[in-house]
Amino acid sequence: MRPRFFVRAGVIATALIGAGSGAAWPTEPTELAVRVPRAAVPAAAQRRPIFRREDARPTLKNPSANAREFFFTRAIYNGGGRRWGAWATDFPKADRQFLTILDRLVDVDAYEMENAVQLDDPAVRRFPFLYALEVGNMYMTEAEVKGLREYLLAGGFLMIDDFWGTYEWQNFEAEIKRVLPEYQIVDLPLNHPIFNTVYNIEEIVQVPSIGNAQGGPTWERDGYEAQVKAIFDDTGRLMVVINWNTDIGDAWEWAESPYYPLRYSTYAIEITVNIIVYAMSH
């Protein structure tokens, strides 16, 4: 019997995409506007009601991690040879900025701060969404392999990002095979629901790092083409989404920069929102 997650169901509410766009307002004059001169209408009646997010869910003045619906959880794993390890690339700025954006786009009660958890920590099972990057330098311990396998088979979801080219792919493939040796890595077609859960994505965009986004090549090493791959379990449940030859996290980190092209940050935000909403609702 597979262990269960300690999370409650139904954490995703209605997406608030396009709120306040004015699309719901009539474009033709109303009966009142035809019969009564505008100057005769009280000022209060002339004003349209304004949708305010705090009317639906008040903004917390003192954010707390207690009893929240969603945590953007980053995987801590062994490997990378850096002071903090490769897992900490773009951390915590990218995580915090994406959470700010997520709060504006989707009505989910997300914890506003970063949440990094070790793969061999049993507490990882509290968080059904997990993000890992720079996996071309991943070298998991046996305890981390065991922890990630149990996490995924119990219903967890893993998003992979920011690794490039043949060598890094071979390293990641070897590592994930240690975790899920019985499951195959397959291409994720654009007609999969993950590409239209909230935003309709018709093209996989290669997202470059900030250093390459301002006129340089968008690729690194021999990773010329961005690809999205996946691992499904025996029932067809999507367990792992693999973003290869792309750097989605860098787009979150630099989304506010006037020097980072909108095309890349828009795609990075849209695909991640889709992945999270899909993961939390399936």
Image: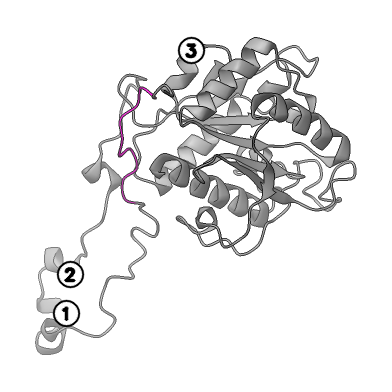
CA distance for labels 2 and 3? 57 Å
Does label 2 or label 1 sit earlier along the sequence?
Answer: 1
Does label 1 or label 3 sit earlier along the sequence?
Answer: 1
Q: Is residue 73 visible?
A: no
Instruction: Give amino acid for label 1.
Output: Arg
Side (left or right) of 29 relative to 185: left
Q: Quadrant of residue 179?
A: top right
- Residue 80 x %, y %: 78, 19
Q: Quadrant of the N terminus?
A: top left
Q: Secondary structure at mark 1?
A: helix
Does the CB distance between marks 2 and 1 fall below 8 Å?
yes
Any mark on residue 122, and which? 3
Instruction: Give amino acid for label 3.
Output: Pro
Q: Secondary structure at mark 3?
A: helix
Q: Which residues are magenta?
A: 5-14
Tag in front: 1 or 3: 3
Any mark on residue 38, and which? 1
- Residue 235 x %, y %: 49, 43
Q: Nearer the viewer, residue 48 or 216?
A: 216
- Which residue: 53% across, 11% down? 121
Does label 2 or label 3 sit earlier along the sequence?
Answer: 2
Say if the magenta span includes residue 13. Answer: yes
Q: Which residue is mark 2?
A: 46
- Which residue: 34% across, 42% down? 12
CA distance for labels 1 and 3? 65 Å
Q: Please tell me how crowded label 1 is: few (under 14), some (14-19), or many (20+) other residues with Cα within 10 Å.
A: few
Instruction: Give amino acid for label 2.
Output: Gln
Side (left or right) of 13 relative to 256: left
- Residue 201 x %, y %: 57, 61
